[in-house]
Image (spheres, grey):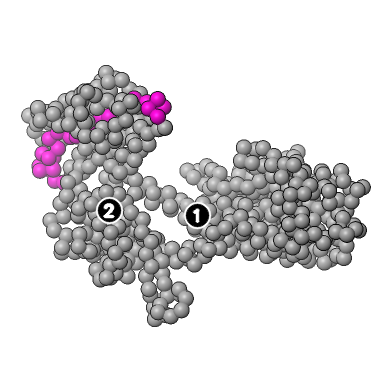
């Protein structure tokens, strides 16, 4: 259970537009971080900690004690409101920390967010110990793929390009040839003369081929009977780029031996995929690794992972080309009806789907397919697929949590609008480009409430927050889907209208002033000083290459001039003014 631990050194807790007390509310029983499993705290100046949860105990002691210079710099940078910080941190724990190895070292990844400029920052931690210990396993993913293929006993694994030349072969080579002897040579040149056409069809296949007999030549003469399986390779644009496959030496193997070896190698391959996926640096990397490994592990043409978002399945990762969707509707209906492991087929493909769950609720789907004519899905395939569902379900949960934290860090907690940092970043992307000719003009509306202090003074800050949140919703409902809107601080908001003329922007501003006056004018309780808004309109001209901060400053000046004149009004900042 999280706890709040306010510090007496917090001062009066007041900053422009936001109190430190509102930050401490994050750690209340019903606060948004009450169930946060990692360390979380609000830090103030001079290494003070204003509030924390139980998981942050070690971090609190470190900050109050000998705080590392890198962490102190990150805290100060965020404290000054310059930018959010992400800081890796190693904590020595336990008596074995001083011994050999890193068993006593715990790694944290800290996200440090400006909370109140010059007064407080929000620190969120994620335990990255496992990531640190296993990261080396994913440093060279291409080589890892080659290593996994190497698990397939001593069979000859290969890959060809669009010209039919070997671009990858097993490290040990094949049939007396070293790997370097085969690379770059036409694959069909290594087939017996009578099997040349069959070899070209396999090594440059455009469709899946399974267990096709073929005779290859030995170095120095002679032939070796093999059984070849191959799948075509496609680029992300759907262009055929070559083939990949396996040739199994049939000269000395019995059927029983081949069956036993097939099960053994698939077990080892699946184990390797699981190890790699657990060491992935991010949930998305974990999903990509699993999707890439499943076709080889289960002998399918392709695999896809879907996540359940707002009641709909959305693609999260895929390998093996576009997923056939003709039979997916029936499979989804059966899964929604309560089935967890289903099969289906149409005239072209056979598919199998397995639901993934989190806390017994479906959160995703594993979907595999293969062309008709290939081996049917066996009980063994279903068992292997079931082994993967826990890993996929956990990766989908982590991905959803990561996105939620990202959304929270970019949103204003009171109004739900983009916060200042997020709005500025989005506006910077909107008005940036390779050259001025590629940019579009627009207008910024800088909005600030008038007489809002009367609401707080007469009705209290809680009522003031409720009025401000309701006003934000009203303003948000007046903007279009392509407009940017955010809360800058306190009672200040901003809207960017892309491609709107100055006249249209001024008219939009006047409509907002009228709508807010009609909806909230009486909230002050003083008919002489009603609640309203003043708006400064600042036009953006791409040819000026103006920065976001300068554009906001011009809008603020235009708003301030009108606000000083009394009441709510709209002011236009001439582009010629600097």
Q: Nearer the viewer, residue 546 or 119?
A: 546
For disc 2, the marked residue is 78
Quadrant for the N terminus in the image: bottom left
Q: Nearer the viewer, residue 343 or 90?
A: 90
Mark 2: which secondary structure?
Answer: helix
Q: Could one spot residue 263 in this view of the protein?
A: no
- 2 or 1: tag closer to the N-terminus: 2
Q: Position of residue 212 (x, y in %)?
A: 84, 51
Circle 2 packing at 10 Å, graded few (<14), some (14-19), many (20+), is many
**Does residue 389 appear to the left or right of 128 in the view shown?**
right
Q: Could one spot residue 132 in this view of the protein?
A: yes
Numbered tag placed on residue 283 in the rendering: 1
Q: Position of residue 153 (x, y in %)?
A: 74, 65
For the record, the magenta segment spans 435-462
Depicted 181 relative to depicted 454: above or below:
below
Q: What residue is shown at x 26% (from left), y 37% (from top)?
A: 549
Quadrant for the C terminus in the image: top left
């Amino acid at each position: 259970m999280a706890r709040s631990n306010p510090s007496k050194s917090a001062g009066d807790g007041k900053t422009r537009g936001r109190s430190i007390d509102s930050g401490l509310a994050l750690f209340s029983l019903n606060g948004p971080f009450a169930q946060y499993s990692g360390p979380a705290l609000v830090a103030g100046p001079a290494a003070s900690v204003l509030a924390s949860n139980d998981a942050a105990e070690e971090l609190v002691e470190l900050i109050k004690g000998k705080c590392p210079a890198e962490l102190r710099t990150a805290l100060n940078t965020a404290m000054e409101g310059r930018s959010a910080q992400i800081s890796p941190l190693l904590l020595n724990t336990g008596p074995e920390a001083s011994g050999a190895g890193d068993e006593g070292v715990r790694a944290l990844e800290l996200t440090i967010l400006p909370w109140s400029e010059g007064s407080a920052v929000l620190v969120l931690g994620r335990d990255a110990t496992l990531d640190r210990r296993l990261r080396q396993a994913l440093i060279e993913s291409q080589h890892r793929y080659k290593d996994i293929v190497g698990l397939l006993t001593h069979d000859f694994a290969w890959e060809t390009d669009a010209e039919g030349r070997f671009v990858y072969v097993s490290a040990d080579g094949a049939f007396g040839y070293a790997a370097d002897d085969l690379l770059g040579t036409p694959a069909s040149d290594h087939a017996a003369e009578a099997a040349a056409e069959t070899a070209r069809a396999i090594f440059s296949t455009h469709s899946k081929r399974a267990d096709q007999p073929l005779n290859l030549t030995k170095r120095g003469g002679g032939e070796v009977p093999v059984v070849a399986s191959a799948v075509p390779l496609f680029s992300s644009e759907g262009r055929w780029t070559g083939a990949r496959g396996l040739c199994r030496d049939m000269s000395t193997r019995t059927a029983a031996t081949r069956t036993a070896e097939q099960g053994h190698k698939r077990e080892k391959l699946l184990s390797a995929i699981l190890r790699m996926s657990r060491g992935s640096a991010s949930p998305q990397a974990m999903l990509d690794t699993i999707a890439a490994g499943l076709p080889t592990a289960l002998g399918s043409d392709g695999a896809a992972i879907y996540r359940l978002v707002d009641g709909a399945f959305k693609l999260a990762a895929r390998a093996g080309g576009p997923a056939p969707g003709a039979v997916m509707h029936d499979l989804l209906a059966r899964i929604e009806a309560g089935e967890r492991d289903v099969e289906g087929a149409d005239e072209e493909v056979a598919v199998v789907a397995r639901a993934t769950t989190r806390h017994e609720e479906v959160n995703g789907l594993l979907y595999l397919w293969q062309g008709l004519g290939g081996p049917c899905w066996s009980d063994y395939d279903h068992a292997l697929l079931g082994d993967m569902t826990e890993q996929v379900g956990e990766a989908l949960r982590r991905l959803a949590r990561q996105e939620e934290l990202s959304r929270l860090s970019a949103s204003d907690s009171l109004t739900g609008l983009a916060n200042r940092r997020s709005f500025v970043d989005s506006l910077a992307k909107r008005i940036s480009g390779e050259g001025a000719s590629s940019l579009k003009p627009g207008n910024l509306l800088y909005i600030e409430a008038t007489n809002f202090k009367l609401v707080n003074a007469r009705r209290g800050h809680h009522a003031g927050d409720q009025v401000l949140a309701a006003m934000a919703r009203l303003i948000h409902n007046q903007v279009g889907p392509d407009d940017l809107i955010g809360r800058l601080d306190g009672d200040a908001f901003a809207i960017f209208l892309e491609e709107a003329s100055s006249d249209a922007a001024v008219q939009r501003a006047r409509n907002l002033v009228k709508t807010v006056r009609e909806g909230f004018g009486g909230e002050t309780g003083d008919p002489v000083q009603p609640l309203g808004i003043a708006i400064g309109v600042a036009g953006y001209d791409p040819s000026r290459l103006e920065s976001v901060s300068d554009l906001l400053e011009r809008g603020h000046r235009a708003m301030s001039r009108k606000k000083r004149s009394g009441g709510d009004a709209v002011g236009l900042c001439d582009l010629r003014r600097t």
